[in-house]
Amino acid sequence: MILAAASFSPGLFASPVLFGLFCWPFLVVWALWASRRPGQASFMARLGLILSGLALLGCSSGMAWGQELCLGMEACVPVLLFLLRRGAEPVKAKASFREGMGIYLPFLVTGCVFMGLLLRPPLAALFFDGAGTVLLAWWDGRATRRAMPAWEAVRLRLSGVILAGLGLVVMQGGSVFSSNDSAAQVGQVLALAGLCMMAGLGSVASSRAELVLLDVGLRFIPLFLMTLLAGTPFMQHLMVIAGLLAMVGMIVRRQGTPPLLSWMTGLGILAAGTGQIPCLLLLYGVALLAMALRLGCEDFFPAGALVLPVQMVLPVIIIVLVVLAPLLGWVALAGLLVCVMLGFRQLELETLPRNVLTVWQRGGGLMRGLLLLLILLNLLVATLLAWGVLSVQPLPVLKGR
């Protein structure tokens, strides 16, 4: 468990130098607010991406490679958001902070995700994840029709922060429990329930594609924290059940096209429960690319192209299923396959060539780059699986009797 080992290592930050270099979102936000120049945020997003890349290359010694990969992917989010929102109305040069919050928000939320990934104590990561969730819900709930759904989502996920924090504290034991083992088991159950709530299980993602792109990192931080709990057969079984319930919940709602981020969350819980960190990282990267593609399709293309991100991610989902299948019992595997087949029955795969051609012709350089990245990622993962690089190590505790 590379991420688990890193989270329980001594020290507050995974790298104090990286903590300072990754503070650029906060510094830029307040500098732009003070100077009343929110239009410079797009330039600073590109500059921040360059600084983040240099920081990872030179100052990440001793960090887990999974953390480095997550930080690098998250650093791309503000750049993707600004480049794909060409159709948005420009912000006035002398706009107030509230008027320019749409420009500042990516920096603030990305900063919260950075802190969640860089801080070793799980409780600190929970705090910053909750802060980012509140920011997104506040901005999403400004519209009257979105106020109640946004409040319901943030209430559920903040309740998850409290429950997960309580579980982590209970895991330390105390005089109330008969033994440390019983305290650890109770704390693990509470922490798992809270992390599932923080990951968005039971809540519907925002209808605004730019907020969903920012929400990817906030949902995956709890998934990475779940790897800290998957140390006993009991917890691994519970995590597999939670992942299956997440996917069943999406089917029961009958929303037509599967909500992609919710599906990725369910598969991520299965990957965390079976100890497949490479699959969890793969899902994180694919979710970011797919949400960026959805944002571009929503702004520039007809509604028929909105199913394209789900279609493009389908090969990666199948590869993840191939990796996870040997680790699951027959009952769990059968339930997972049924969920996948029912969820993708309205995927309209026959529209895939036409949608790809439309995006390629009208999308511009960035949209073409996203398409190529998804295609190359599918080919790369399939090749790695064929070569055995994505090794599957069966866990007997998850096999059916």
Image (cartoon, rainbow, N blue to C red):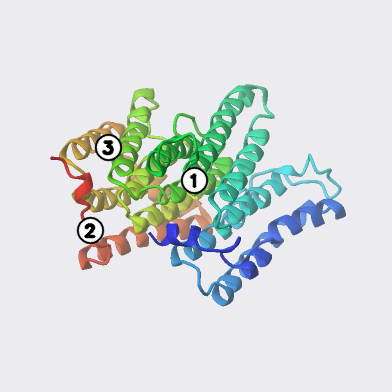
User: Where does the image place residue 363, in percent across and percent down from the top left?
Assistant: 50, 52
Q: CA distance from mark 1 to mark 2?
A: 30 Å
Q: Secondary structure at mark 1?
A: loop
Q: Which mark is residue 393?
A: 2
Mark 1 vs mark 3: give the one in front.
1
Residue drawn at the location 68% of the way across and 66% of the way down: 20
Would residue 127 appear left or right of 304 to someone viewing this image? right
- Give the residue pinned by disc 3: 340
Of marks 1 and 3, which one's residue comes earlier in the chain?
A: 1
Is 137 or 190 nearer to us in this picture?
A: 190
178 sits to left or right of 162? left
Residue 172's disc is 1
SS type, badge 3: helix
- Disc 1 versus disc 2: nearer the observer: 1
**What amino acid is labelled 2 in the image?**
Gln
Mark pair 1, 3: CA separation: 38 Å
Q: Is residue 206 shown above or below 124?
A: above
Find the distance from the CA under tag 2 to the CA under tag 3: 23 Å
Name the amino acid type tagged 3. Answer: Val
Residue 162 placed where, x, y %? 56, 35
Q: Are marks 1 and 3 in contact (CB under 8 Å)?
A: no
Crowd class of label 1 (few under 14; some 14 to 19; many from 20; radius 10 Å):
few
